[in-house]
Image (cartoon, rainbow, N blue to C red):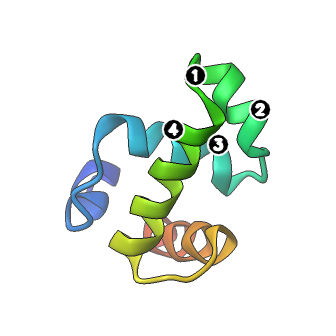
Amino acid sequence: MSTKAKLQKFQFTPRQLDVARYASVGMYVKCIADRLGISARTVEGHLTAIRRKTGTVTTAAAGCKLAKILAR
């Protein structure tokens, strides 16, 4: 199964995928914002949506969950 198909069940937007990718490797909110050219507040909003869609409480937990899904 492709990476895209594995993540499709979460219905992430393209920008949420970008933010999730950077957050999953431990990048700080400000660094993600600078890299993507968006505000830190916008990154926080994307992280909130990512946590809600993955059913996790922390960003680290969401990153772990996504990593496990992609490793299958």
Q: Are marks 3 and 2 in contact (CB under 8 Å)?
A: yes
Q: Are marks 3 and 1 in contact (CB under 8 Å)?
A: yes
Q: Which residue occupies 39% across, 60% down?
A: 49
Q: Which residue is disc 2 drawn over?
A: 31
Amino acid type, callout 2: Cys
User: Nearer the N terminus, badge 2 or badge 1?
Assistant: 2
> Gap between marks 3 and 1, in whole Å?
10 Å
> Gap between marks 2 and 4, in whole Å?
12 Å
Amino acid type, callout 3: Tyr
User: Nearer the N terminus, badge 4 or badge 3?
Assistant: 3
User: Nearer the N terminus, badge 1 or badge 4?
Assistant: 1
Q: Position of residue 26 (x, y in %)?
A: 78, 53
In the picture, measured across the screen, residue 52 lies left or right of residue 67, that is left
Residue 36: image tag: 1
Residue 42: image tag: 4
In the picture, measured across the screen, residue 13 lies left or right of residue 33, that is left
Q: Which residue is disc 3 drawn over?
A: 22
Q: Position of residue 32 (x, y in %)?
A: 68, 34
Which numbered disc, 3 or 1, marks the residue closer to the eye?
A: 1
